[in-house]
Image: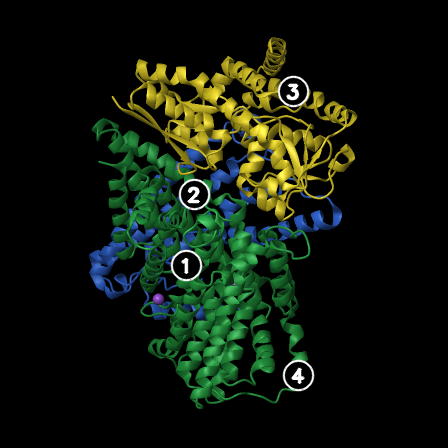
Chain colours: A blue, B green, C yellow
Amino acid sequence: MAGSAAVLEDSSLLSRLDRALLPVERLCALLSGIAIFSLMFLAAWSVTGRKFFASPMAGYVDYIEAAMPIIAIMGVSYVQRDGTHVRMDMLVSALKGRTLWFFELVSVLLILVLIVALTWGAWEHFARSFDCARPLCSRDSSIDVGIPIWPSKLVVPVAFGVLVLRLILQAWGYGRALILGLENPVAVPLALTVAEQARIEAEALEGSD
Amino acid sequence: MEPIEIGLWVSGGLLVFVVLGMRVAFAAALAGFVGLVWLRWNGFDYDPERFWKAVEISVKIAGLTPHSKVSAQVLSLIPVFIMIGYMAYHAQLTTALFTAAKRWIAWVPGGLAVSTVFATAGFAAVSGASVATAAVFARIAIPEMLKIGYNKQFAAGVVAAGGTLASLIPPSAILVIYAIIVEQDVGKLLLAGFLPGMFSAVVYALLIIGIAVVFKSVGPPVGGFTWRERFASLPPALPILAVVVIIIFFVYNPFGDAWGTPTEGGAIGAFIIFLMALYRGMRWKQLKSALLDTAKLTVMIFSIIWGVLIYVRFLGFAELPEAFADWITGLEMSPMLILICILLAYAVLGMFMDAIGMLLLTLPVVYPAVMALNGGELVSAADSAFGMSGPMCAIWFGILVVKMAEFCLITPPIGLNCFVVAGVRDDLTVQDVFKGVTPFFIADGVTIALLVAFPGIVLFLPSLAG
Amino acid sequence: AATEWNVSVWGKRRAFTEHVEKLAELVAEKTGGEFTMNVSYGGLSKNRENLDGISIGAFEMAQFCAGYHPDKNRVVTVLELPFLGVENLDQEVAVARAVYAHPAAAEEMAQWNAKLLMTSPMPQYNLVGTGEPRDELAEFEGMRVRATGGLGEAFKTVGAVPTSVTATEAYQAMEGGVVDTVAFAQHAHLSFGTINQADWWTANLNPGTVNCPVVVNIDAYESLSDAHREALESSIPEAIDHYLTNYAALLERWDSVLEEKGVQKVEISPEVISEFQAIAGKPNHDAWIAEMEGQGLPGQELYDLVVKTLAEAKGGS
Ligand code: NA
Ligand code: NA
């Protein structure tokens, strides 16, 4: 399922920025993967403690809930970079050249507007739970062990902030392709046919062996 | 303007965004956000001075939704189930399963094809996603079938169809998503998928045996394995059994209290598979790549979840689901006929859309309507239209839609499993796979009809669990 | 002019939401349908985000429980302290009303743009459990209990582990062994099905309860016309009365429910209760007061207010 589609590279400024952002995005995604991996140990530990030592882990649910935004949202930009977010590409895969870049550009600009709005809203949500006049800056705490919730809320605007940068680069990439009439632009995921995509996915599975 | 009208316009707009190829997650979130602004400004009688106030409120509502909605313990099942699949691959469980299935059951007519079906069913028990299963078995099972003279289209069809079993047999990411959207017991839904999944596998196997008996050329029996060889093939496949038992016992223990929650069961299962993968030579490099792949798929799924939930939040303010439920229950048709129409609509939609996106987009409106059709969330079996209580109806409908969504993985034009199989094999075109998978449409049609006619197949296990 | 309010509550319609439903009914009646309230069960917000929704102006009225997020509403958590000695719902209403009227409570809620309207009076939270009844303190050691807020603290002091699955997941958590016991009021044991899993119920442990206010958005409240505001204010006592009557009927049915479901009614001995009280009552109260004073809130004053109001309520009844 997860395999990278083609994102071309060259020596242009745009491509260099694309490659500069990539390690940040990959780190975010790896954090998400490591959080999932830790979840496995946390659950195993909690069950073992409960079943065999009659000492259940306090705050188990609180910790999982706090980790969920890292797991679910941190990698959002990494997934956008190579176009892994699902879409219905019946129409798009039939388009070519400037028409295609026009559709992609409009789509990315709309997403950019949306994500800027969501970044603002997510930041506000964080800000409502954050007040440094109080112990641990906490104005919202978890239900069992009372840990502050603001760090977990902060994950969302940070992840969305990275996504905003990515979307700006993609809008630039598509806009450039539209104006210059490029065939294979850099720094944007190239729309593959479903068949090509499936082949790449299958190879990714093989390659990870 | 009435809120419901705004709801309809925005939902129509969402459809346009999706058809035009916007990523489903963002299309849904954008529709929800625009809808929230529109609804709020409508409430302000389109006073130009209060437009920005409407935007501000909507930004804040939409902006808190991703954190609010993903911070739920039950959702942690999804990444864990996805991780199991990637780890299972590194633990070389696929080959082990296929070898065991071959040695034990390939002596029947169409032997290797039947073995493939049961091996995919077994792998389904450690894989939360269908496409991955098809990709893996295309590589292992198709060459063996071709070696003994199978028709290549048919061999490819078997693998594409077998892959769909992964989403019914637990663990299943899509069943978890269904449970969360409709706020039903995850454990019972997972339990409910088990028999229909095995049932589907048996229907596939019977179909293959039938074809092999009629057309001798399709696939000969493969015999000659000694009992020693048979038993020797079992230990490498054993972890699968351990995972199945653990997940089931964590949800429902026939001998007493369940051992814990499905999430814990999934995590322990993943842990066992992880140890197995370590033993089979997985190191940091492979682990890192497995974790990145898991994260990627997880984030993709969660983006759809929070995106759609922003849209659902808007629907809540627009009161559209209630209106749709009223409309459906007001129709002059028998409830069963309406249900069949809904399932057929899913079959058509699924031809063009990915399964998770399809369910997430439609369920917030369709599910309340189906529940209302049966007589409401709290209806007793005796007073209901389908002869089952509200919670049982929720489970039954969930299995039906998921089976429907899986069916769409092998139907043209966008049957993803077929594309994956063709992608793995250079000697197969997509058309070949679609041709080979055609007989399985009949099998799936039969399965769905039987699940509709005999809900007991779905509801037997969950009703045991209370 | 017509006013339509959105009200965010959660779960299903149950005894716990009857005052909100009644309030909506009364207000519409008194204003000739000019002022209506649209009560939504989970459609507008998650329960733990209801206060955020009020602050944003997403909806005009909402219900929440103090223990869900103590740092959002430190002042009203005084009402969730264990073993306060509240005996019935009338006393519960009296103490809540006094605390809600305190400037510190109003000020903290104003930070969320919220005004406290009324409480959702809850009887003492008793335990249901599976297996052998736990009727001695030693048996609470290592017990996984679904209890929030001050109740959770109380059980913690005797070695139990509070595990807060949401109310809607409580049944499954009990079934799956995630928790051994669940502390709820009677209506919730019925509504969330935990009574169907239970082998026993503690009839007289009475460790305390939760406090779940109904609040309104201040801007929405202030923009009401005088007639509408009057309709709202005057309906509150009636709505609470309706709630109390409804709850009393439920409590009357309770014993027959226990019998029907085959749930053993466990009477804890007075010695065990006073032992529990000694460990979990006073020390928790003192700790709460110290913590609030440390944060610049009038903890002692609030606590004294509760004690004084309760004494008056008991004297009066
Ligand atoms: Na599966
Ligand atoms: Na399809």
Q: Is disc 4 placed on a helix, strand or loop?
A: helix
Numbered mark located on residue A13 in the image: none
Label 3 – label 1 distance at C-alpha: 51 Å
Q: Look at mark 4 in the image and give the residue it sits on.
A: B229
Residue nearest the observer in this picture, B376 or B77: B376
- Please indicate, yes or no, whether residue B271 appears anywhere in the rendered image: no
Judge if badges 2 and 4 mark residues of a common chain. yes
Numbered mark located on residue B401 in the image: 1
* Residue type beneath disc 2: Pro
Residue nearest the observer in this picture, C137 or B376: B376
Image quadrant in which you'd find residue C230:
top left
Judge if badges 2 and 1 mark residues of a common chain. yes
* Residue type beneath disc 1: Val
Q: Is residue A100 left or right of C183 when viewed as pictured?
A: left
| Residue at x 61% of width, y 64% of height | B283
* Residue type beneath disc 3: Leu
Q: Is disc 3 placed on a helix, strand or loop?
A: loop
Q: Position of residue A116 (x, y in %)?
A: 34, 41
Q: Look at mark 3 in the image and give the residue it sits on.
A: C84
Q: Look at mark 2 in the image and give the residue it sits on.
A: B66
Q: Is residue C143 left or right of C250 when viewed as pictured?
A: right
